[in-house]
Image (spheres, rainbow, N blue to C red):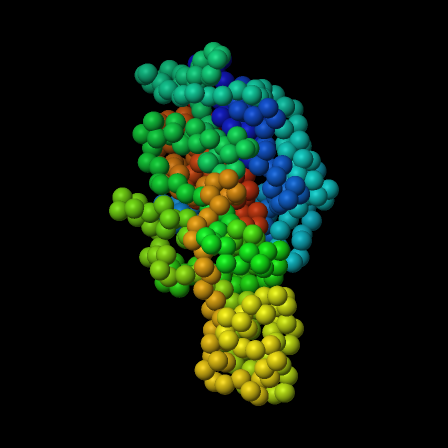
Amino acid sequence: MAHNPIVVIGAGAAGILATLFAARGGRRVVLLERSKDGGRKILISGGGRCNILPSAVEPDRFVTASSPNSLRNILRSWPLDEQRTFFERELRMPLVLEPETGKLFPESNKARDVRDRLLQRVREAGAVIRLATTVESVSPPAAPGETWAVRLRGAETLDASAVVLATGGLSVPKTGSDGIGLRIARDLGHTIHPTYPALTPLSADPPVHADLAGISLTVTIRAPGAKPRVEARGGFLFTHRGYSGPAVLDVSHLATRVAASSARQPLLVQWSARQPLLVQWTDRDRAAWEAVLQSGRKRVSSILSDAMPARLAARLLTEAGVDAETTVAHLDRTTRKRLVTLLVEYPLPWTGDEGYKKAEVTGGGVALGEVDPATMESRRHPRLYCCGEILDAFGPIGGHNFLWAWATGRAAGIAAGDSTP
């Protein structure tokens, strides 16, 4: 089996790293990619700029239906500072902090530079990249010491000494994601936690806030009753169909899981569609708004417009039943409390989501307990490795999912490269 290559399936972030680190061990490596170029999610990330990494890791904000301890162990396998060193020193790609978001971008602000530099390093390491190649199935060795069989559509079957599944999930199908890796893992006996679109915009039917489309601001969103506690602070955008922006994306998994849940699919959180997402539109909490709206000659509309976009302020006043000319002094107690509640606990009237088409990642996937957290090797099949989005974990907006992909891809590549040929 010494002459048989390691086969990596999927040239996304995790697959590229797995290929690079496996090839560095001196082994023959073949990277198979369905699209004609590879790394398409890298290209579209960060609005075409590629948010390579976060400036700080937030393990508690990762979501998994598997063991949180397994997730933390995987995250610790390649610390953030070491990942940054890899990009800045080995790839000679300086990273620049965007202070307002805490994101790290390449100095060039070009996602294509990231993708191209990584693929260049893969080729320099001696790996073979086969583009426009579709994998149909993967079969395990018939007996110990024999090879894996990777069957290709309209082509030969590759005999592999080891296989790395880095196919991604189901999000953004236009990039080539079709769930093939999840199917392969399931066929090989792995437990697949129910999948769902995550980090995706929410929709409202009817679109009751369509007239506010284009308005953006920084908000805090909370999910009352969610366990563990779910709260996100960040950008919020009204769209013609509903709501988007980092804060919305970071809590959207609650909505998508409720929509997809059934008696056979347990939820991570004790939460239901009857418990809405609540939005705090400004930095002021209830006590602060109560203090501002207690007394004075200023118009209530002026106070709200100073704190948020005017069109949103007008909408909240209308919903609270406050006339635009009303001054603070003429605001009765009942109306004031109704307005304050809309300012700090506004029930977001979502009814659905934009699904995998606009989801940044896939929730669910291969159970983390079925892979070794240090090597990403399957506990069910020796010399089978799983990495990246195919695994049951995802993090918040801001580079955390690339961090996960880089870490798990590297671990899988090193271990595959060290496996007995």
| Residue 210 visible at all | yes
Placement of 335 over or under 20, stated as above or below: below
Quarter of the image with the C terminus is top left
Residue 247 visible to the viewer: no
Which residue is the extreme one toward the left? 263
Q: Is residue 398 above or below residue 28?
A: below
Q: Is residue 48 above or below residue 215?
A: above
Residue occupying image coordinates x 40% and y 21% = 138
Q: Residue furthest top?
A: 156
Q: Is residue 97 left or right of residue 236?
A: right
Residue 240: give x, y in percent of width and height. Answer: 56, 52
Question: Which residue shows up at 31% across the image and 29% down it?
Answer: 189
Left or right, residue 277 beside residue 132: left
**Identity of the residue drawn at 35% across and 40% down:** 193
Residue 363: percent from the left, percent from the top?
A: 43, 43
Q: Nearer the viewer, residue 82 or 216?
A: 216
Q: Is residue 412 above or below residue 213?
A: above
For the residue pair 390 and 236, the one nearer the viewer reads as: 236
What x and y, as percent, mark residue 315?
56, 68
The picture places residue 88, in percent across and down from the top left corner, at 67, 41
Left or right relative to 377: residue 51: right
Q: Quadrant of the N terminus?
A: top left
Q: Nearer the viewer, residue 296 or 311?
A: 311
Exactly how many numbered labels are in the figure?
A: 0
Using the rendered view, name the quadrant where residue 128 is placed.
Answer: top right
In-front residue for pair 41/404: 41
**What residue is drawn where x is 66% and y is 31%?**
116
